[in-house]
Image: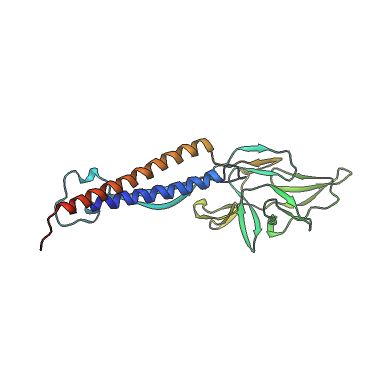
Amino acid sequence: MIYGLYLSAQGADAQQYRLDVIANNLANASTTGFKRDHAVIQEHPPFDILNGTGAEAPPDQLNHAGGLSISGTYTNHATGPMVQTKQRLDVALQGDGFFRVQADGQVGLTRDGQFSRNEQGELVTAAHGWPVLGQGGTRILLPPDARDIDISSDGTVWAIDENQQRGSLGKLDLVIPQSTELLQKVGNNLYVGGGQLAPAGPNLQVKQGYLEGSGTNPVSEMMELIQASREFETNVNMLRLQDDAMGRLLQAVPLRA
């Protein structure tokens, strides 16, 4: 009976964690460049099978689970949908790679390509004002008298003057981490870590006038939310049922003086 209580409690805890991950995905369904998270839950074999007890295990024990544990989250870094905005400082990344930005005293990575120009003329992220870094860690300055800004597919930023003359302002520092599994989300669409960074290859293309949409599909996410809610409720009901049965058993056992 106690074994069942532990299993149900583990199940409820795992589904609560899953609900938190799904809720965060839904909250970012319209966030530019957001990457969907998946809750990773591990099933274990029965304790007696895994560790041995010195006694012969019941013949059907392999047909029963040995509980669950939360392994963490897996982030799906697949490229999201391309959304056309026609804004000159909006750029989307198509392929594997990230922008490098200077965020609150540290260098981080992001897929959010919604940029703007700050008072100092620097190219920055529109949402938080983080300077967007060029190759070599330099900041990209946009001339105030530029008639237009053109961003090539390789990340080169050009200023076009009133005579239609083009001048290079630098090249976006597009990088790819050693492993996306080592990346850590720190909030506000920013990643740190990932191991050694390398220049992104030619498979990464920059699309001016576009933004990368969120990797969250609200319809499928709502279906998962409903499923996880029902599984959480089932585990809680099983806890109550087993607790009630245990109470009845204890009341039925005669007290010894």
Q: Is residue 70 visible?
A: yes
Q: Quadrant of residue 197?
A: bottom right
| Nearer to the camera, 57 or 161 | 57
Residue in the image at 71% along x and 59% along y: 138
Location of the C terminus (image quadrant): bottom left
Q: Residue 58, percent across and down?
A: 16, 47
Above or below 135: residue 233: above
Return the x and y of residue 123 as percentages of the image width and height.
Answer: 74, 53
Quick check: 123 left or right of 191? right
Side (left or right) of 7 relative to 135: left
Where is residue 104 shown, x and y percent of the image?
A: 64, 62
Outermost residue, top direction?
219
Q: Nearer the viewer, residue 11 or 82?
A: 11
Residue 219 spot, x, y in % from top left: 51, 35
Asked if residue 172 lies left or right of residue 196, the reply is right
Residue 46, can we see it?
A: no
